Image (cartoon, rainbow, N blue to C red):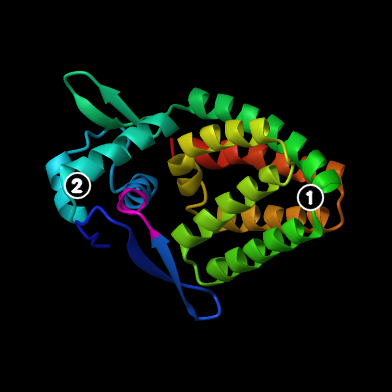
């Protein structure tokens, strides 16, 4: 995706599952940030690799200033490390790092599940259901990156439906750190299908406001994520 060099807001378009083009207005910073994050998630920028600002900036069609701002944001998310004399490196996680993060995510999401089933409005639950339906359409199309983004949006939406801002902020921070690992965890068809099955269970539990049921399937889903990513690590 070529990004306009102007520092003002720019317009990007995307397709909905109904085939209707939806126009989304984002700033240049957001556009560069999103594209750089996708490059890390998809492995175009490998774990441990140094980010060459000249090359990456040229590939995105932007100057170094917006690129450096995006790098700073991704460093705050934990996806990039800025090391003196070496520059910006894509963060490399080992199995212990992932296990520890997922243990905390599990506790957060299970707490959020119970709260969301009590506190979420019908409109919030309907919105999560629509995300799920769109995710399933991306799964049917085997569009892994779009599927993954919707998948992560569902987890985020469930947590936000807990109406606990501290819980949501902590979850956002940890979830951002392991996006690349979670993305590659579903590389094989059987693992992807298993994850989709768990999401189907989640939406049923949420729709019926079964807090304990939703907490159980979320916990099981995150436990299995460790197994799904182990080989990739």
Q: Which residues are magenta?
A: 26-32
Indicate whether residue 190 is drawn in magenta: no
- What element does badge 2 sit on? helix
Q: Residue at x 61, y 66 (%)?
A: 136
Main SS category, magenta section: helix
Quadrant location of the C terminus in the rendered image: top left
Q: Is residue 14 above or below residue 153?
A: below
Q: Residue furthest top?
A: 84
Could you say where residue 55 lies in the image, as x and y percent from the top left?
A: 14, 46
Q: Nearer the viewer, residue 9 or 150?
A: 9
Q: Residue at x 69, y 58 (%)?
A: 128
Q: Residue at x 47, y 65 (%)?
A: 143
Indicate whether residue 29 is drawn in magenta: yes
Q: Which mark is residue 27?
A: none
Instruction: State the CA–CA distance, disc 2 to disc 1.
Output: 42 Å
Label 2 sits on residue: 56
- What element does badge 1 sit on? loop
Could you say where residue 202 lies in the image, as x and y percent from the top left?
A: 74, 53
Q: Nearer the viewer, residue 60 or 27?
A: 27
Marks 2,1: beta carbons within 8 A: no
Q: Is residue 134 above or below residue 154?
A: below
Left or right, 178 with respect to 192, comes to: left
Q: Which mark is residue 120?
A: 1
Q: Residue at x 21, y 57 (%)?
A: 6
Left or right, 85 with respect to 147, comes to: left
Could you say where residue 60 lies in the image, as x and y percent from the top left?
A: 21, 54
Circle 1 packing at 10 Å, graded few (<14), some (14-19), many (20+), is some
Q: Nearer the viewer, residue 141 or 159?
A: 159
């Amino acid at each position: 995706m070529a990004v306009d060099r102007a520092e003002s807001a720019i317009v990007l378009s995307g397709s909905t599952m109904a085939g209707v083009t939806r126009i989304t207005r984002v700033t240049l910073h957001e556009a560069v940030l999103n594209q750089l994050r996708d490059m890390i998630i998809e492995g175009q920028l490998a774990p441990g690799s140094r980010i060459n600002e000249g090359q990456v900036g040229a590939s995105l069609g932007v100057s170094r200033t917006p690129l450096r701002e995006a790098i700073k944001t991704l460093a705050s998310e934990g996806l990039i490390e800025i090391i003196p004399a070496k520059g910006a490196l894509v963060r490399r996680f080992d199995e212990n790092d992932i296990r520890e993060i997922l243990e905390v995510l599990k506790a957060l999401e299970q707490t959020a599940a119970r709260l969301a089933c009590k506190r979420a409005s019908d409109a919030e639950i309907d919105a999560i259901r629509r995300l799920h339906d769109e995710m399933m359409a991306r799964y049917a199309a085997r569009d892994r990156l779009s599927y993954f983004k919707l998948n992560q949006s569902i987890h985020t939406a469930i947590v936000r439906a807990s109406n606990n801002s501290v819980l949501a902020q902590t979850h956002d921070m940890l979830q951002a750190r392991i996006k690349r690992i979670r993305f590659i965890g579903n590389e094989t068809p059987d693992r992807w299908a298993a994850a989709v099955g768990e999401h189907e269970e989640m939406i049923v539990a949420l729709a019926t406001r079964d807090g304990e049921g939703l907490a159980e399937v979320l916990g099981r889903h995150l436990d299995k994520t460790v197994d799904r990513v182990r080989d990739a690590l």
